[in-house]
Image (tube, rainbow, N blue to C red):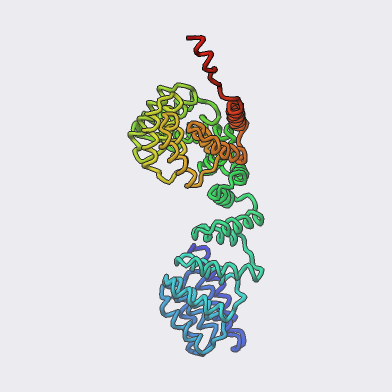
């Protein structure tokens, strides 16, 4: 306590002493209580206690003096004695609000959170309209790891019309911690409406929308966040970059990732995401360069090898791409991605046995994936192993595949087996599945070919069989 404040308090006390000496005796307790308060404010707790002891010696039931003494005891580091006074007063005067407030002050000084919660609940049971106390109770419940109870208190506050700044934000944070994203989003959106422009709230909204895969809304929220966040805010800029990537706004994603990589050049995860954004933006050379930088730091990053293979394949560097896929296959033996790509590349190059081998490895990892069975069926058909092709194509259908491409593959298989009737059935199913223009044209071509073959077969059947010459003609010839 500053000496100036103490001197001011002492001067005021001297005036009160004069008033107490000269004034009527009935007003003396008022002056003494005022003197004790001035001593307390001036930090002279011992003097304050002496004055209050004089008051209580004259009148042990002086309620105001008892409350003042308890307050001085708390400040003097004796909250246990103050708590005893408070509870004694509560038992004799249960409706006195000051005793509850004093008890809370004592418990806070003693750092007893569980008892504080019970005391606040008792206080609110008698004075339910004390909104500030309910807000404190919610905060303590939250600190004690009881989010459900805290949320109940917050909802009670809102129902009674008390909506201080931040209450919806706190509720949103609790819902978020509990994993209830819809309610968290609702609370945070209300917090943004009531107090727009808080970066913390906008960041939470953008994260929830991104987690819910509402990417356009997440991008909009990330833009709003970027407008209020500091220029070097890493979370805000990364959210913007990721949402832009998901919304296929690749130029925006590239610009955002550029600033992130400049800020944290050592982050491998950032470089991978930046390389991916460059790839989708069509900057294949820069994308490959970023993946190679990642691999310089960690040559055993299988996913980076695979992604580099994707970039090289897109740029038609097929041998280099295949080499990257094979490296990824060795580094990620439990991932189906490299085997899928190796099978596709072998199939495109008409290395059908290699394609079957790669697809079989893929099938071992994902036996329930209908796509791998569809690819195997196609590869076996090209190898003219028609029974194996039929088995895998049928398995793809059993697993729920119903694409036009799969049905068209069955058309080709049935045609290769000479089963035009079944081929026609699958041709109809292909057309019903809504194929693209290329597949539609191919199916219609197969249908025309089947029509032509059947027409030729009918014509041949309608012609009379060749007859042998009469016997006499044979004799003449002989």
Nearer to us in this view, 391 or 113: 391
One can see residue 231 in this view: no
Farthest top residue in view: 477
Residue 203 point in image, percent of width and height? 56, 48
State the count of labels: 0
Residue 271 point in image, percent of width and height? 45, 33
Residue 369 point in image, percent of width and height? 44, 44
Nearer to us in this view, 62 or 331: 331
Nearer to us in this view, 383 or 465: 465
Seen in the picture, residue 116 relative to 247 is either above or below; the reply is below
Seen in the picture, residue 181 relative to 297 is either above or below; the reply is below
Seen in the picture, residue 251 relative to 109 is either above or below; the reply is above
Seen in the picture, residue 153 relative to 231 is either above or below; the reply is below
Q: Residue at x 48, y 69 (%)?
A: 43
Residue 150 point in image, percent of width and height? 52, 67
One can see residue 460 in this view: yes
Q: Residue at x 49, y 58 (%)?
A: 177
Displayed quadrant of residue 186: bottom right
Nearer to us in this view, 129 or 460: 460
């Amino acid at each position: 306590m500053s000496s100036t404040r103490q001197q001011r308090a002492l001067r005021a006390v001297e005036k009160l002493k004069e008033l107490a000496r000269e004034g009527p005796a009935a007003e003396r307790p008022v002056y003494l209580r005022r003197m004790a308060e001035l001593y307390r404010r001036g930090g002279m707790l011992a003097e304050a206690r002496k004055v209050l002891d004089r008051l209580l010696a004259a009148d042990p039931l002086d309620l105001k003096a008892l409350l003042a003494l308890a307050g001085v005891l708390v400040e003097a580091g004796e909250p246990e004695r103050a708590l005893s006074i408070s509870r004694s007063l509560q038992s004799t005067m249960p409706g006195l609000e000051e005793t509850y407030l004093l008890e809370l002050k004592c418990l806070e000084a003693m750092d007893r959170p569980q008892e504080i919660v019970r005391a606040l609940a008792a206080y609110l049971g008698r004075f339910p309209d004390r909104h500030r106390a309910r807000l404190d109770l919610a905060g303590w419940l939250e600190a004690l790891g009881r989010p459900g109870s805290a949320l109940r208190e917050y909802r009670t506050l809102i129902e009674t019309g008390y909506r201080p700044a931040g209450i919806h934000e706190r509720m949103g944070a609790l819902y978020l911690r509990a994993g209830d994203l819809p309610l968290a989003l609702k609370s945070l959106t209300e917090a943004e409406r009531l107090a727009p422009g808080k970066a913390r709230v906008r960041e939470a909204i953008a994260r929830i929308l991104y987690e819910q895969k509402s990417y356009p809304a997440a991008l909009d929220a990330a833009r709003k966040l970027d407008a209020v966040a500091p220029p070097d805010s890493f979370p805000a800029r990364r959210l913007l970059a990721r949402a832009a990537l998901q919304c296929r706004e690749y130029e925006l994603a590239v610009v955002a990732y550029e600033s992130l990589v400049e800020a944290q050049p050592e982050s491998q995860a950032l470089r991978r995401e930046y390389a991916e954004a460059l790839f989708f933006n069509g900057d294949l050379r820069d994308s490959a360069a970023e993946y190679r930088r990642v691999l310089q730091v960690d040559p055993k990053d299988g996913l980076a090898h695979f992604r580099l293979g994707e970039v090289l394949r897109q740029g038609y560097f097929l041998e280099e791409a295949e080499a990257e896929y094979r490296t990824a296959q060795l580094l990620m033996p439990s991932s189906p991605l490299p085997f899928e790509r190796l099978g596709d590349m072998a199939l495109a190059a008409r290395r059908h046995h290699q394609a079957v081998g790669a697809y079989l490895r893929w099938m071992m990892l994902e036996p329930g994936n209908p796509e791998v069975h569809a690819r195997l069926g196609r590869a076996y058909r090209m190898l003219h192993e028609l029974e194996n092709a039929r088995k895998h194509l049928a398995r793809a259908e059993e697993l729920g595949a119903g694409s036009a491409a799969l049905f068209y593959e069955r058309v080709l298989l049935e045609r290769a087996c000479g089963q035009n009737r079944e081929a026609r059935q699958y041709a109809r199913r292909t057309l019903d599945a809504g194929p693209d223009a290329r597949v539609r044209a191919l199916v219609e071509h197969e249908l025309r070919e089947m029509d032509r073959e059947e027409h030729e077969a009918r014509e041949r059947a309608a012609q009379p069989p060749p007859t042998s010459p009469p016997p006499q003609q044979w004799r003449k010839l002989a």
